[in-house]
Image (spheres, grey):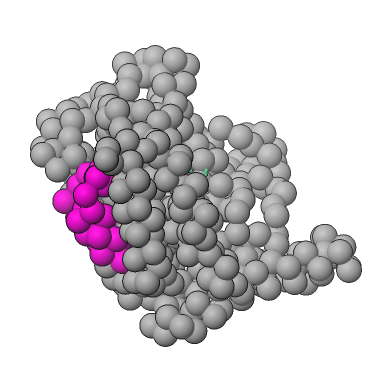
Amino acid sequence: MDIAALRAGTPGCAHRAHLNNAGAGLLSRRTLETVTAHLELEARIGGYEAATERIDAIEAVPAAIAELIGGRAGEVALFDNATHAWQAACYAIPFRPGDRILTGHAEYGSNMLAYLHLARRTGAEVVVVPDDEHGRLDTTALEELIDERVRLVGVTHVPTGGGLVNPVAAIGRITRRAGVPFLLDATQSVGQFPVDVDEIGCDMLAATGRKFLRGPRGTGFLWVRTEALERLEPHVSEVSAGVWDDKDGFLWQTGSRRFTTFEMNYAAVLGLGSAVRQALELGPAVTGERTLALGAALRERLDALPGVTTYDLGRERCAIVTARVAGVPSAEVKDALARHGINASLTSPDQARTEGRDVHPLVRLSPHYYNTEEELDRAADVLAGAARAAQPR
Ligand SMILES: *Cc1c(COP(=O)(O)O)cnc(C)c1O
């Protein structure tokens, strides 16, 4: 990888040390120009007319996503974020009283709230699978909990608030053997390192465009394995999702189109397509190796600092690094980083509620392949300075 060229093609690199890729990755210039060109085309010739003119590029976007994650084009539906994509799958599962939803402590807070909502509505029950000694979902415990009541296993691959990577391929082997649907929240993993739906063995996968994939904000997608479609009943029907039928009233569209609605932000869709194509060209194995190495290097630097503690669970850990400076509120550390031109973020107790750890908010630093060791040094220096200033004299 030519890091200098990639940075030159990423306008944000000239202005900030962007260590908030778990929040939103920086757009490449190519993606930015794709988005603005389409907005300008819409303004010049009309929104519908612009979509018609760019129809080939628009229709290529689900295919590019499928190529990235190992599915088929017809299995991908586009959304305005990962939450809606994930919900389209989860709310399509016909839960009945007594059914069980198995999930883990790292589950995204919004997903957990949806499980609780579904439980309240349908009489299903939510069961949180215990962690193993590394803080990952314990696959032995999962296997023991699988029985005829289990209607869904829902797992977050990488949580929003830490470096944990859940053992998703081992989970997939268990769900496949049991014939239980497996819904994977891959929002923080797609774009960060290689994610392949067949290697994992999940049936449904939701992700966002804006994080490690570097797509525009307001984009997301759902992938559903063709074989899993028949077990799902989408919770919304409209003219893109359904087709009129004289006998049955309506039928579902073929493939994952049945989860979509008519209107889309096509500038953002095309921007997502540009970002996915760039990820494919660079190669997820190549970019992932560098991204994970930068994450490990940053964690190592922070762990070496007196008064700084990292909090990332797991055995294999990713490029999301969470830390606290003793005696300094995390929000102040984030502000100090911002004063030095470094973008970071805070973890949210609401999104990490299911973890059961009383450690949030933490400072979250999430490098991507276009970051440099020098930027990591600068961030570590700010945390070191904050720790020194907080020490009693
Ligand atoms: C950000 C995030 C989401 C939600 O993605 P949106 O695009 O904001 O809806 C879901 N799961 C995880 C793990 C996330 O980090």
Q: Quadrant of residue 273?
A: bottom right
Q: Is residue 110 visible?
A: yes
Q: Is residue 338 left or right of residue 57?
A: left
Outermost residue on the front side: it is 393
Q: Nearer the viewer, residue 2 or 307?
A: 307
Image location of residue 144, percent across then percent down: 12, 31
Image location of residue 122, percent across then percent down: 44, 17
Instruction: Report the residue at 17% width, 35% height from top.
Output: 131
Q: Nearer the viewer, residue 172 or 95?
A: 172
Instruction: Report the residue at 39% width, 14% height from top.
Output: 123
Specify start and end residues of the magenta stretch as a single range: 294-318
Quarter of the rendering occupied by the N terminus: bottom left
Instruction: Report the residue at 61% width, 34% height from top.
Output: 236
Q: Quadrant of residue 297?
A: bottom left
Give above or below for 268 relative to 98: below
Give above or below for 62 relative to 281: above
Residue 299 forms part of the magenta stretch: yes
Instruction: Report the residue at 43% width, 72% height from top.
Output: 370
Image location of residue 93, percent across then percent down: 43, 32
Quarter of the rendering occupied by the C terminus: top left
Q: Nearer the viewer, residue 329 or 248?
A: 329
Image location of residue 304, percent across then percent down: 20, 56
Tally of numbered tags: 0
Q: Is residue 182 visible?
A: no
Give above or below for 375 relative to 188: below
